[in-house]
Image (spheres, helix red, strand yellow):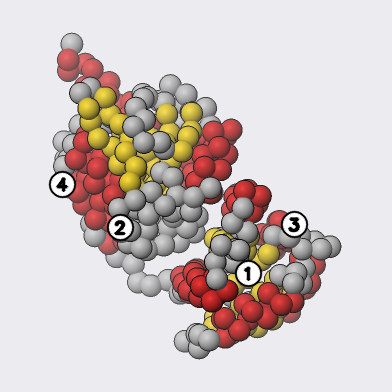
Amino acid sequence: MRPVRILIVDDPAVFRKVLSDLLASDPEIVVAGTAGNGSQALARIAEIKPDVVTLDVDMPEMNGMEALVEIRKLYAKLPVIMFSALTERGATATLDALARGASDYVAKPSYRETPEGSHERVRKELLQKIKILCAEHAPRPQLRLASTLVPVRAEPRIDVIAIGTSTGGPGALSELIPQFPADLPVPIVIVQHMPPLFTRLLAERLNTLAPLEVREGTNGQKLQRGQVWIAPGDQHMTVTRKGVDFLLNLNRDPQENSCRPAVDVLFRSVAQTYGANVLAVVLTGMGSDGTHGAAVIREAGGEVLVQDEESSVVWGMPGSVVAASLADRVFPLSGIAPEVMRRVSMRRAVAAGARV
């Protein structure tokens, strides 16, 4: 297999050199070229035809955001990984870039890190993301019709929606969450793999886009209908029951699947707390976080929907659920909200009628 060809786009020449040296240590990666601003990047992409682009946010002449918009017009599927600072401004810019079609991001070295530690972190994160985003599609399990992916089971009332996502998640959530109405009769709890600060800013952004109230989770918070709670970066989020109330709990227990927050942790807790009354959704993301939790949800009688490969940035997490035969249905991103609403409304109406 030929090596992955990468174009590094960054203003400081010293950082281009550092990044080139870090990537050159991997025989599966070739730095095909570099550029110092967005205009140069567009010319270099046409010239060298890279497999992936790393793109700085702050650059002269044409900045990273402007370059990203032009790249997406010309190269809709070219993976683009943003570099930004771990600051509020940098996190905001990263979320803007993800909303405009960036594939993923890596935080630049910060003053809190040693040079050796930061270089090793960037190297590991970037190499992993490059290889996954540029990997040729592995053989997928043969999918039958979505309606026959799993045996038909009893249809319990839905009392909570649990969502897990990673790479490509901010964009997917920005499309999905605004489709739910303000009078949604159940709460939504979400794990999005992101560091602290990023999750808060993501919640604030979604809150401006959606009719629902969207906030970052807080310890002891009571869940109520029509609310959306996103797990804070570097904290697992669980749901417990106290009397008639359902409460959020946060902890810093060990990582699972190299993640904190982890989707598996949230999924297990909603299955244990709500039993069969859970509807889980697994969106785009690399890795397999959420698969074990999906198994627990299904064992408890709940259901699992997943995003399809075509509309996913990376079909790792949803693909893993499908491969494990744990998906009740597979939908394109555009079809998930209507199906969730159909199931929630129908099941709760049936349950209400049965009580009369």
Q: Residue at x 48, y 53 (%)?
A: 195
Work out whether 108 lies above or below 49: above
Q: Is residue 169 left or right of residue 13?
A: left
Element at badge 4?
helix
Q: Percent from the top left, x then y, of residue 228?
A: 43, 33
Dot placed on the residue nearer the N-terminal end, 1 or 2: 1
Badge 3 is on which residue?
Answer: 66
Badge 1 is on which residue?
Answer: 54
Q: Residue at x 75, y 69 (%)?
A: 11
Query: Would you say residue 324 is visible in this rendering?
Result: yes
In three-dimensional space, the C-alpha distance between marks 1 and 4, rounded to whole angstroms, equals 42 Å
**Quarter containing the C terminus:** top left
Badge 2 is on which residue?
Answer: 254
Badge 4 is on which residue?
Answer: 299
**Amino acid found under the numbered disc labelled 2:** Pro
Q: Is residue 277 left or right of residue 252?
A: left
Dot placed on the residue nearer the N-terminal end, 3 or 2: 3
